[in-house]
């Protein structure tokens, strides 16, 4: 599947919702990452990181949003959905995207330390895997990166 930048109005609108979720995470002391799942043009799930809140290392915004979306739709296959997230997914989250059969990933800031959908790895288009998904990157990247920078600056 193709990857690249696409600043469509819908992507920006959905990313703003994901950024709102990221701010909730930051207020709770979690790394400010937010995610929404969109199906047929509607947001069906909206979550933020909850690792600190739940003491669960898998409580990344992407995983939580995918779980909620599957519950809303009553199925684990999310092949007609888009996940919008403020930070490029890590290896665990990219694996969850593969396993959910997501159609499209839209992310804001690249993750040079752990990005698994374009920066360090690119599992989204590995021909050896049973599923590939489209990646749109860089949507409101500056806003997404600034939240993370502000969060970590406060902790230093």
Image: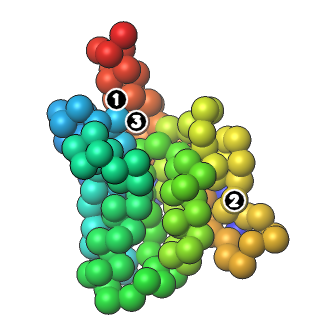
Q: Are marks 1 and 3 in contact (CB under 8 Å)?
A: yes
Q: Quadrant of the C terminus?
A: top left
Task: Calculate the distance from the C-alpha at mark 1 to the C-alpha at mark 2.
Answer: 26 Å
Q: Nearer the viewer, residue 79 or 6?
A: 79
Query: In terms of image quadrants, where is residue 99?
Result: bottom right
Q: Nearer the viewer, residue 103 or 121?
A: 121
* Left or right: 56, with 84 as reference point: left
Name which of mark 2 and mark 3 comes first in the sequence.
Answer: 2
Q: Secondary structure at mark 2?
A: helix
* Left or right: 83, with 120 as reference point: left
Q: Is residue 16 above or below residue 69?
A: above
Residue drawn 45% across and 69% down? 82
Name which of mark 1 and mark 2 comes first in the sequence.
Answer: 2
Residue named by callout 3? 144
Q: Position of residue 6 (x, y in %)?
A: 55, 54
Residue drawn 51% across and 75% down? 100
């Amino acid at each position: 599947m193709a990857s690249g930048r696409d600043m469509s109005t819908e992507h920006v609108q959905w990313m703003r919702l994901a950024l709102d979720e990221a701010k909730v995470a930051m207020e709770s002391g979690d790394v400010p990452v937010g995610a929404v799942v969109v199906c047929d043009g509607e947001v069906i799930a909206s979550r933020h990181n909850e690792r600190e809140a739940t003491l669960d290392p898998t409580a990344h915004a992407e995983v939580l949003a995918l779980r909620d979306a599957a519950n809303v739709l009553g199925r684990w296959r999310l092949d007609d959905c888009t996940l919008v997230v403020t930070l490029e997914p890590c290896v665990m989250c990219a694996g969850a995207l593969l396993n959910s059969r997501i159609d499209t990933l839209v992310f804001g800031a690249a993750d040079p330390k752990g990005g698994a959908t374009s920066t360090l790895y690119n599992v989204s288009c590995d021909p050896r895997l049973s599923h590939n998904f489209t990646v749109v990157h860089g949507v409101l990247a500056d806003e997404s990166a600034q939240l993370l920078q502000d969060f970590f600056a406060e902790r230093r």
